[in-house]
Amino acid sequence: MSILEGYHEECGVFGIFNHTEPANIAYLGLHGLQHRGQESAGIAAADGKNIIIHRGMGYVADVFSEHELTRLPGKHAIGHVRYSTQGESHLKNAQPVVVSCWRGPLALSHNGNLVNAIELRKILEHKGSIFQTTNDSEVILHLIAKTPAPQLKDALISAVREIAGAYSFLILTPDSIIAIRDPGGFRPLILADLNGSPVLASETCALDIIGATYVRDVEPGEMLTITDQGIHSEFPLAPEKHSFCIFELIYFSRPDSQIFGQSVYEVRKKLGRELAREHSVEADVVIPVPDSGIVAAMGVAEAYQLPFEMGLIRNHYVGRTFIEPKQSIRDFGVKIKLNPVRAVIEGKRVVVVDDSIVRGTTSRKLVRIIRNAGAREVHVRISSPPTIGSCIYGIDTPNEEELIGAQKSVEEIREYIGADSLGYLSIEGLIKATGNNSRNYCLACFNREYPTKKFSGKRIQLSLFESNS
Amino acid sequence: MSILEGYHEECGVFGIFNHTEPANIAYLGLHGLQHRGQESAGIAAADGKNIIIHRGMGYVADVFSEHELTRLPGKHAIGHVRYSTQGESHLKNAQPVVVSCWRGPLALSHNGNLVNAIELRKILEHKGSIFQTTNDSEVILHLIAKTPAPQLKDALISAVREIAGAYSFLILTPDSIIAIRDPGGFRPLILADLNGSPVLASETCALDIIGATYVRDVEPGEMLTITDQGIHSEFPLAPEKHSFCIFELIYFSRPDSQIFGQSVYEVRKKLGRELAREHSVEADVVIPVPDSGIVAAMGVAEAYQLPFEMGLIRNHYVGRTFIEPKQSIRDFGVKIKLNPVRAVIEGKRVVVVDDSIVRGTTSRKLVRIIRNAGAREVHVRISSPPTIGSCIYGIDTPNEEELIGAQKSVEEIREYIGADSLGYLSIEGLIKATGNNSRNYCLACFNREYPTKKFSGKRIQLSLFESNS
Amino acid sequence: MSILEGYHEECGVFGIFNHTEPANIAYLGLHGLQHRGQESAGIAAADGKNIIIHRGMGYVADVFSEHELTRLPGKHAIGHVRYSTQGESHLKNAQPVVVSCWRGPLALSHNGNLVNAIELRKILEHKGSIFQTTNDSEVILHLIAKTPAPQLKDALISAVREIAGAYSFLILTPDSIIAIRDPGGFRPLILADLNGSPVLASETCALDIIGATYVRDVEPGEMLTITDQGIHSEFPLAPEKHSFCIFELIYFSRPDSQIFGQSVYEVRKKLGRELAREHSVEADVVIPVPDSGIVAAMGVAEAYQLPFEMGLIRNHYVGRTFIEPKQSIRDFGVKIKLNPVRAVIEGKRVVVVDDSIVRGTTSRKLVRIIRNAGAREVHVRISSPPTIGSCIYGIDTPNEEELIGAQKSVEEIREYIGADSLGYLSIEGLIKATGNNSRNYCLACFNREYPTKKFSGKRIQLSLFESNS
Amino acid sequence: MSILEGYHEECGVFGIFNHTEPANIAYLGLHGLQHRGQESAGIAAADGKNIIIHRGMGYVADVFSEHELTRLPGKHAIGHVRYSTQGESHLKNAQPVVVSCWRGPLALSHNGNLVNAIELRKILEHKGSIFQTTNDSEVILHLIAKTPAPQLKDALISAVREIAGAYSFLILTPDSIIAIRDPGGFRPLILADLNGSPVLASETCALDIIGATYVRDVEPGEMLTITDQGIHSEFPLAPEKHSFCIFELIYFSRPDSQIFGQSVYEVRKKLGRELAREHSVEADVVIPVPDSGIVAAMGVAEAYQLPFEMGLIRNHYVGRTFIEPKQSIRDFGVKIKLNPVRAVIEGKRVVVVDDSIVRGTTSRKLVRIIRNAGAREVHVRISSPPTIGSCIYGIDTPNEEELIGAQKSVEEIREYIGADSLGYLSIEGLIKATGNNSRNYCLACFNREYPTKKFSGKRIQLSLFESNS
């Protein structure tokens, strides 16, 4: 029940090299990646000598006005959008991070999560480093600054040898961009071309708006050094088994993107078809939880040979905190976002399709809302297996104790959410739908098999806190 | 191409009588009507003696925080959301309007447009009235204040006898709410019940969130006086032919609403089926222009027996002005809102379904974007007839000179937008899909037959202007 | 203790006719009048055809940026600054007020207070008028609009014949400015010249910044009609005894202004000298309550032949609400604004000079602060008589019940504030210092002799309230 | 001409240890130091375990609302106000700075300027440090973090041994505050007591508002370690000749403060008397440039036995940028801040007293304004010697090329500013007035004798820039 309950993508990155208006292009590219993070946005631009940055809290379109963009001239730029959490959010943690070190100014945009960041931070602190944010990214910048290797790329290689976890980094210097993707390839990163200017982005959907052409994925473990001399590729790290984040396909990426070489749209359709095959049903209509469940629901409807209808309408004007009346309203949190179409639901046996169940509380409300709209039966179908493991690679998942999939059996969950039937896609079905190659994916959230040695399963505890209201 | 190009609903109204937290309920009700107006929002609350109001520019959730809501206590409340235009927008014109007159304080929320407002304003000015806004609503309040009838409802009757056009008014006094809908019934207005508290709203979709039950439509020409004595209904005006705004069904209302006694969702499905029946096609896939074209497109796909796919993905984070690079980007305006799914479109003969074409420029861009995503053919289907008339009843339509439907033949439009074929729904098809009773609807935008004597076809020219940046 | 406790001037007005950048000039003129009102500011500009206005809450420099000023083109402009109260303040009540009526658009800036505004408003409401603000100014605009006289100036004459109280009005039409001052002349209004462009302002201190030359005071009861034909003067009302507000000289006007034909600075000096002559003292040093008591204190020191020292330092960064610690701080309200200079005060017998005592609570705190800084004795001298009457002519005074001068004897006040001695200037001394002509001034706050028939002693009760946070 | 033209104090610091509401006390203390910096304000609070911080751009009263203060609980707090420059100002550079290092969290507030910050930064960068701001303070934190000494105070000692320049530091840990003042004692720092809670502040004027009692100055070179065990004093650095900033007495500190053991008020009075003795004059009246010139002008008037008058009135509502009309106004910059009192000036031979002349352009305007107000003669007296050197110890002075005192003779300056006579206080007179002990003061701005080896005379060039509009 993702838009309702909760996973949060941990960022999108974008870079453009050698363009006449790199900040404007980065601004549009980030807009195309806005679904990957709505908390803060930032762009760092370089003109060959200096790096100038602007960051702010909020959407790309709110953080940047013409005024800010014209103050970011130059030739090259990298940008970042950051996810939104319920709790504290600080400008301080916004990215890109820019620092000055003996190599000159450096800016960094990061998508992913380092699993040994706390350990490295402790080691660095004991060597005399000071930290001003709670970003992983500060760790990597310290490692780069501490390495005596004269070439930045060698320092970066040395630095990434010390880190573990998921990362797609873009590093901007006054005259170059370096991109590196971890050897597992957890997070996507693609290379594209805009009339000769190299472009880097988390997803292909950022390309269409700027008119760039997809070239290829940056490979797991690959480092690209982009300078006026061209694009240099190398693989400085020992190869590892691929660990593509399967949730990018199930939920996070936009359906109009190509991720890990596949169309997200087509994969979701297949997930739906596979899901329907695994769980037969007697029903009248299939409806999605919009927007994330739409494509899978179409696959479900197709396989069930049932009508597909938009039985739930999403209210797009949901902003921040909504004020609940004192006499509190049942299922309030869902009702301000979704509303049932009685004409579609009333008197029907309804199959409702979503991508996942996190805590279960929202699914329970949703089932009740659908029933109250007149459904005779409510059959829930989930286009992924039960979520039993918390992600340590850059997705803001609750702890296992809060994950209903980790705490209850499917039948218990069905009972809890009040559905007439509940069907999850099996891991096998998931693998089949995503290309029949289980070895490519990180499935930790479904099987608790963490591809990296699990250094630190929790997100870094904030030891600094800046109130930034 | 409505989300892209154009029409703007002119407001939604909401009222609640005799509740312990009327402002909180109005706030949620207005959230459910947010699609009818995003420029400004306001709530006026009454406690038996006084009326207190808060209004602001922006979304309901932005205008009202807990602080504002707790300052609006009382028993009764009316609220308003106002449409968003490109041009100037002023807090001054936000509603409800509150005035003091010899009857005491009065607040008014208005959905619609008076066609003789300018004439009445001139007459009133020549009798010594002064005007402080450019709202129609000020006219009606002047008329009410000038009428010597001791009862407010009689004054209102006297006032509405002088006005012509579309109106669904809610008037709040310290201890009553009066609702009146014009005899043509242009704009919807419904009566509902929340545990004994009467509720009024523009659409039924505002009811679900607060848990209210639909009672019935306020009838065209009906006036409801709601006091502690109960709800009194009367029909003070001469009956007229009904003139329900057909565009409420085609585009404006939310698909989860019941409007004019029909499910908007079902009507749109029928519009799509009828449209397909009128224009056969050889194609591979049907895609909607989201979100407004989705339901009609499903009807089209069903009738064509073609797959329905979400071939265009909407970017929901589109805020205000987007900054375009100097080297301007082709089809920029559409690209920041919609992106094609290549996997769905490539190599296909695509039918794209929208609710209307306004100026044609956006449709032209959209056709180009779909072709660039690899479509072999692009067939455009519009679930309404060509728009040839400008609305004077409360919808912000361009002048006829700007309406491509008024300026070009269908073939010329097809050529202009670059489609392989273009099919509009016929007026007959429209009538059939909306219940086979043409006499109920205002079809002026399709046939230029304005149900009222056309006093003034243009919106009031601002003679006052307040900059309110 | 005026900056501390409170009187609030009720506005300043400014006008300029026939200038190439009237809004810019009005902006600077209003800045020169900022001490007369800090709540809101506004400018209405006319270009011969239309009137355009911008208003906002706050200081002139905050309300207007270059953006707003460039949107106010034209030839003529009037402006307004409005006072600041503790309570509610609304953009709605900001001035100038602009309305449309049969005469076309009209803008009005008003300084003063009508004593029969409530009565007139009731009468107007019973004739069918509606009111949208709680400004007196709306009354006068209604009266003007209702008068059939074809010439605006005749309508204005007819309107002002119905009103009583204090008023200095500026009315802007698309091609003229009309100024009128009440026959008592309560509030100042001057005529000046800026290279041929007529200028109107509340005080002369607004002239220096724009380089305008003082021409003369607008006379009590005089009406000036300024058009392309020149400045026409007439006296349409029956002459009355002058009622210049003596508090303009004592406190409100800036010392660098000429008011009612006298230098404010010189008058205050004389008030101080007269005060010293009336109350002898054995003391070591004279200190003012800054800034309002400075000039009078210099006169006191001169007459006493004692050193004048700045024994209290004002903190100029006092903004809005200050947060007081839970363990509340004694004399907090004064301490955040003023701090004693121990080097000046310690071991001394101190004479502290202020312009008035309102409630007495602040004076009491101040005496305590001075004693705590080491003063051996504290002698309070007030450069005006005890305030016993509440102003009904445009100054925001507390009710008589709150005025310590109306409730206690001088000896009781002395005891309450804890001073070793307390001396007020006598009414005779006041008259002597202000030119020996008692017949010119309104002394109602000191003798309760209200020059006008006292229609309504209270400010209009708000019957409308708009929360405008 | 300081309020007009330009020096800017480089910050004020405040600390309180072991109090029930340390943030509230720090907030008030910073308000009392607001004259030392108006650009940004911040408070870091500690509760024994963690440090929490809030910082923002603007005045203390604007940066902190009740909401922010209640989020800063704890026992101890330090705060900072930062100066205002014309150019770029960034939240990033606001203080206190908080970092995490192996010693745990540390916050630092700094008043002063390190003259070898650039050198140290380069060295640190070459050892692998990264810098995120352009604050000197980051340098000292790096030095502290890099020192292996287990005790923080030993690390601080080791760190300050590497730095040179002016510094009054407050360092907050979760359970202690350490204060250190450079051996020259450039910037003031005092120790006070609030009912048993130790207080540290830049000036004594911060004490009165909170009711704290002055204990003593922190001595030059002294380090105070404040813990639950009490206050420990030590002098870890080699003693140096004192270098108290003489400009603190002439201009920066508030007249109600005791600085370097003297009353600022009394010193300024003596500066005025000495100045008058050095330069006789035939004149009628002495007027100050308010507010900074007031006390010296009183001394001048006393010594000349001439009347002291407030011949220039300051407009306190000057906010940010003022918009100048296209037809620019002569002496605009001064006119929006000061206005002459014609009654005081007209026909008189006027002595105008200010504390300094920076570029001369403002003095020139001021002389012209006074002449235009009718002065027969204008004699300028400056209560300090000609400023010939740029400050490198924490005061934002222009370069020597821009200092008129460094470029022209006194006679040339007199001619440039258009005065009838010009008299500066001599260095001897300055020394006499400030206690006859030249060895105590840094006089570098008057004699270019910089007490420290001049490492880097320029402020650090920003190598990072964050736009923060």
Image (cartoon, coloured by chain):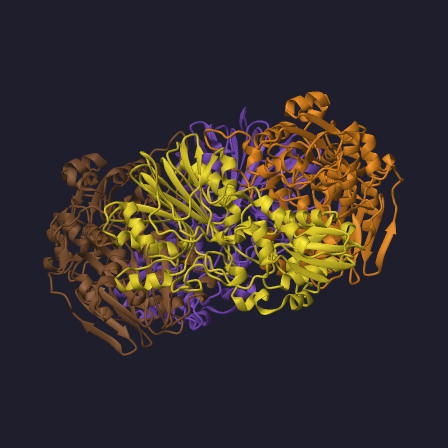
Chain colours: A brown, B purple, C orange, D yellow
In the image, residue A354 sits, relative to residue A413, either above or below, namely below
Viewer-nearest residue: B149 or B388: B149
Residue A338 appears in the figure: no
Give the x, y percent position of residue B457.
61, 56
Q: Which residue is more in the foreground, C74 or B157?
A: C74
Name of the residue lying farthest toward the bottom: A229
Q: Is residue B153 left or right of residue B432?
A: right
Left/right of residue A372 with respect to residue D462 in the rendered view: left
D146 in relation to C136, above or below: below
Q: C114 or A207, which is in the foreground? A: C114
Q: Nearer the viewer, residue B293 or C382?
A: C382
Residue A459 seen by the camera:
yes
How far across and how far down the image is residue B172, in percent?
57, 34
Q: How many marks?
A: 0
User: Measuring 74% from the left and 27% from the top, which residue is drawn there?
Assistant: C388
| Above or below: residue D171 compared with residue D90 | above
Q: Residue at x 48, y 32 (%)?
A: B22
Q: Which quadrant of the figure has residue B347?
A: bottom left
On the image, the x and y values in percent for residue A434 come to: 16, 58
On the rendered image, what quadrant is the N terminus of chain C found in?
top right
Instruction: Locate residue D217: give its quadrant.
Output: top left
In x, y percent, where is residue A300?
21, 51
In the image, residue C411 above or below residue C90: above
